[in-house]
Image: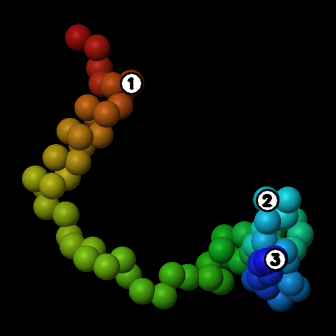
């Protein structure tokens, strides 16, 4: 069965497969138009992230420690 989707920019039908170079868009032009719309903030995520709580200093410190442990490149050599 062939899966078809509508191009988000122009609504033209696009066959969804590994050979569709610009999927879900029909062309590079439609892909770039959509990218430009995001850059100009014409598209927005409608709702805030679920469970987005304010970060405390302790939480930020823990995140920073976790990041530095995972990314030794950023740690000063002693």
Please state which of residues 13 and 35 is positioned toward the viewer in this rendering. 13
Residue sitting nearer the eye, 75 or 24: 24
Between the residue at mark 3 and the residue at mark 2, the CA separation in whole angstroms equals: 12 Å
- Whether residue 7 is visible: no
Residue 74, horizontal then vertical, whole percent: 35, 28
> 21 left or right of 59?
right
Q: What SS does tag 1 mark?
A: helix
- Please tell me which of labels 1 and 3 falls first in the chain: 3
Q: Is residue 8 above or below residue 39?
A: below
Q: Is residue 24 above or below residue 62?
A: below
Label 2: which secondary element: loop
Q: Quadrant of the N terminus?
A: bottom right
| Residue occupying the point 23% across, 40% down | 66
Reading the image, the residue beneath label 2 is 18
Left or right relative to 12: residue 47: left
Residue sitting nearer the eye, 23 or 44: 23
Q: How is the image coloured?
A: rainbow
Where on the picture, by quarter, is residue 71? top left
For the residue pair 74 and 70, the one nearer the viewer reads as: 70
């Amino acid at each position: 069965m062939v899966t078809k989707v509508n191009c988000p920019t122009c609504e033209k039908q696009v066959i969804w497969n590994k050979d569709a170079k610009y999927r879900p868009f029909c062309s590079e032009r439609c892909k770039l138009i959509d990218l430009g719309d995001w850059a100009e903030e014409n598209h927005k995520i409608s709702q805030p992230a679920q469970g987005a709580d304010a970060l405390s200093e302790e939480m930020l410190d823990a995140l920073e420690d976790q990041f530095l442990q995972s990314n030794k490149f950023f740690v000063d050599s002693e």
